Image (spheres, coloured by chain):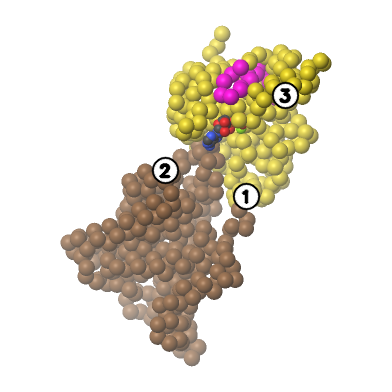
Chain colours: A yellow, B brown
Amino acid sequence: MTIPILQLANVESNYGPVQALRGVSLSVAEGQIVTVLGANGAGKTTTLKTISGIIAPLKGQVKFRGADIQGHSPDTIVRAGIVHVPEGREVFPLLSVEDNLRMGAFIRRDADGVAKDLEAVFGYFPILRERAKQEAGQLSGGQQQMLAIARALLARPALILMDEPSLGLSPKLTKEIFDIVVRINRERGVTILLVEQNAHMALKIADFGYVLEVGRIVMEDTGAKLAEKDDIKEFYLGMKAAGTRGARRWKKKKLWR
Amino acid sequence: MFSQFLQLFLAGVAQGCVYALVALGFVLIYKATETVNFAQGDLMMLGAFFGLTASAILGWPYWAAILFAIVVMAVVGMLIERIVIRPVLGYPTFTVVMITIGVGYILRGVVTMVPGWGTETYSLKTPFGDAVLRFGGAVLAMEQLATIALTAALCLVLYLFFRFAKLGVAMQATSQNQLAAYYMGIPVQRVNMLIWGLAAAVAAFGGILLAPVAFVHSNMGFIGLKAFPAAVVGGFGSVPGAVVGGLIIGVVEALAGFYLPEGFKDIAAYVVVLVVLLFMPSGIFGETARKKV
Ligand SMILES: Nc1ncnc2c1ncn2[C@@H]1O[C@H](COP(=O)(O)OP(=O)(O)O)[C@@H](O)[C@H]1O
Ligand SMILES: [Mg+2]
């Protein structure tokens, strides 16, 4: 078996006294879409920030293609081939769409390659070509999400970390964006680590999935199998199993939230 | 009558250019690090001393002296960021502001200790000398015209840099959304260091332009007290605003100094601030209304 492109071993991260990750271990195989599900506050964002170097972990290892990268600076990690599409898009509001995309390619020196990738990205998101000269802050939420993904692609990453791309988007837009994520994965061979609260959509496209709860991985399996598990159905897919009593459901739910 | 006005106006614009350059430094640093650098005027003073040294003491030509002052001050600006500002990032703004005030004091003190600089007053010779341009009945000093032309040229270069150069766009990006800049692999701290270098270099340019008019002295940095209102008038955080604000204050001051009773000249800058802020609370080019939530 080949080594996974990304591996986390017992990663612990904190915000001052708040311990957000309590020993997270997971691995992502090259070329796959892997999802991490979890309720609000479970530590999904913190996991991604630890991988991309925004946060240095207290303990544990992050390996990218077999080499330790934990605690490295964010620009080293982008150069290594990992780009983070953050929660809430985080575009540069007063820069044009085009300049936002140029900033995605900040680490690159190959102008020809960048120009080619720009075309490719406009192919995935034609609306961005139309809006190229507009300030990014004036785009709608969905368009900003597209810009954030497009901007990440311009770094020509091997691995994209995606934090809740469906946040605040309509189901239709979410589907549109997820379809493109799949295309990016298939056509460009980019590995994707996708963090979501929207388990329904995420499990549909994921090869493999993890469930994160209060800073720990509590479940892992292939996307298809996770979608079949009762707990997942109940708490993430909103399907109530027959005969489950309200009280029990509430108790369990509290554990998840 | 009109020629007199024209002369005063031109002198005001020339003086305003210097305010504009110092104000520009305020704005660049404020946008990048949300810190007001109260040493900006003193950086200008130090730049003027380096220009003076190259020109009067080493005997270099004027243009080489300008270049020398700019390069040395860029390095000084970067060192200040690296040594005293970066370690206190994340502390309350008050701490950082106090530190910049301290840096200003130290620069002023150090200058008086340097042999050949001291507390004397110097004048910097320019290639324009006392040449004048006669226009109608007005007598326009070449030095002032040159100050205006050089400032315009610098502004153009800065505009092109921020608009088209990758580093310039990255500087804008970093000041708009620092976290996103990190996500894109922009080395944010290095970019901020370069912004301090740029701000100090621009201040040095201002100092050299000011030198023929106001003389080089360790206290010339107090002009920052007028450049600060210029930045506020323009809408603190706006680069074009800093330039416009500087020009307005320069012109109002020059006209007030002639047409109004004595004493008005010195308060003109603050009267302008009050009037502008009364009608435009976020300055002429204020961006607050457009900023994302
Ligand atoms: N900047 C922060 N400061 C302090 N605590 C934080 C911060 N960000 C997140 N946390 C805490 O860390 C835990 C995990 O948060 P996060 O990773 O954002 O969760 P998720 O992305 O799964 O919603 C939560 O308990 C949250 O309150
Ligand atoms: Mg989150």
Q: Nearer the viewer, mark 2 or mark 1?
A: 1
Q: Nearer the viewer, residue B81 or B115?
A: B81
Residue at (61% x, 48% y) in the render? A93
Which residue is at a point 63% across and 39% down the rendered structure image?
A88
Q: Position of residue B50 (x, y in %)?
A: 28, 60
Q: Secondary structure at mark 1?
A: loop
Q: Mark 2: which amino acid? A: Arg
Residue furthest out toward the top = A1
The 10 Å Cα crowd at callout 2, few under 14, some 14 to 19, many 20 or more, is few
Indicate the chain on which mark 1 is placed: B
Look at the image and tell me whether residue B175 can be seen: yes
The quarter of the image holding the C terminus of chain A is top right
Q: Chain of mark 2?
A: B
Numbered circles on residues, count = 3
Q: Is residue B252 a member of the stretch shown in magenta?
A: no
- Residue A111 appears in the rendering: no
Q: Is residue A46 left or right of residue B41?
A: right
Residue B41 % position (x, y): 36, 63
- Work out whether disc 2 and disc 1 sit on a shared chain: yes
Pick the front one: A42 or B111? A42
Looking at the rendering, the stretch of residues picked out in magenta corresponds to A202-218
Q: Residue furthest left?
A: B115
Please name the residue that numbered disc 3 is placed on: A250
Q: Classify mark 3 as within 8 Å of ligand 1 or not, answering yes or no.
A: no
Q: Is residue B279 above or below residue A176?
A: below
Q: Give me the C-alpha separation between circle 3 and circle 1.
A: 35 Å
As drawn, the label of residue B242 is none
For disc 1, the marked residue is B293
Q: Is residue A154 left or right of residue B10?
A: right
